[in-house]
Amino acid sequence: MTFSIVAFDPRTKDLGVAVESKFPAVGNAVPFAQAGVGAVATQSWANTTYGPKGLALLKRRMSPAKVLDELTRRDRDRAKRQVGIVDARGRPAAYTGYGCNPWAGHIVGRGFACQGNILAGEAVVTGMARAFESTEGDLPVKLLAALVAGQAAGGDRRGQQSAALLVVRARGGYGGFNDRWIDLRVDDHPRPIEELVRIFNVYDLTMLTREDPKDAVPITPEVARFLQRFLKESGYYTGAVLGRWDERTRHAFEEWMGVENLEEKVRKDGRLWASVWRHVRGKAGAR
């Protein structure tokens, strides 16, 4: 009833899981990941202990293949289980028990594993693998592309209900206090993958800095005047529109950013993230 992908990005060292299912709140059961350790997807009559136990074994530098052997060896219901694992070296492994409901199977590739059960057919996992390998971008983009491709190939043959995306990065969580760089869930929706992509785009705008710093926008006098006019019309600024990026203007802009949930994207170097600049211009109705 589920298809998922676990993967590693050798450039950023990020690890992640993306999953969709005809099952409510699949993000509560399938994805597990820890920065610098690995990622696990446990599904098909999911034994949710496989997540924390698998990560603990990976932390001991056990290979993913041996982790799978250890997890399933003592599980009397292993024939019904399905698991995908990737470690922080990019080594993947997957397991599909012979008792999983058809179609069930997996594909292991370089730095990733795709798996699914109760699927429309093998094309679901092959499509996911192809999309992951061919899509340009960072790990969350590639994981979402794999989900979209899996659904386009038929997905869960019973239908859709929920989806989730988990990507971990050392100190990547809000405020740097944990490793949950991206942890998004759609618990009940008629088109959960499309909704997950929409939510990711919102989260990307507000909380993530995935942009190239070279694309940041300098706060020139022209940009400062635009921001002062915008802030004045929005009720955050009462000063003169002179195009000076002074303390009063900066404080007003940061107050507005906080209301917009953009506090993670505040810069102190006289520049704006390009996404923030686009957002301000969109709010102001500018093109």
Image (cartoon, helix red, strand yellow):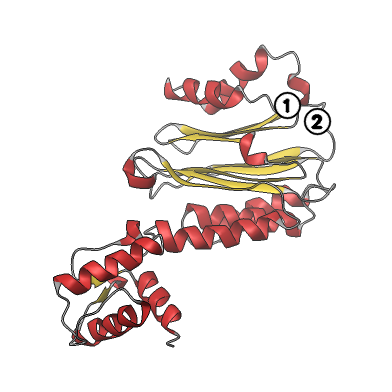
**Mark 1: secondary structure:** loop
Query: Residue 121 bears which disc, if any?
Result: none
Left or right: where does residue 136 sit relative to residue 158? Answer: left
Left or right: where does residue 36 sit relative to residue 155? Answer: left
The residue singled out by tag 1 in the image is: 81
Q: Is residue 86 visible?
A: no
Q: x%, y% of residue 140?
A: 51, 53
In the rendered structure, which disc, 1 or 2, sits on the residue that comes first in sequence? 1
Image marks 1 and 2: residues in contact by CB distance under 8 Å: yes
Q: Quadrant of the N terminus?
A: top right
The residue singled out by tag 2 in the image is: 100
Q: Quarter-wise, where is residue 214 in the image?
A: bottom left
Residue at image position (34%, 81%) is: 230
**Mark 2: secondary structure:** loop
State whether residue 114 is above or below residue 46: below
Q: Amino acid at mark 2?
A: Cys
Residue at image position (67%, 40%) is: 26
Q: Quarter-wise, where is residue 237 in the image?
A: bottom left
Q: x%, y% of residue 32?
A: 54, 34
Of the pair 264 and 119, the residue shown nearer to us: 264
Left or right: where does residue 90 sit relative to residue 79? Answer: left
Q: Quadrant of the C terminus?
A: bottom left
Q: Amino acid at mark 1?
A: Arg
Task: Work out how far the residue at label 1 is from the one at label 2, CA to CA, in angstroms.
Answer: 7 Å
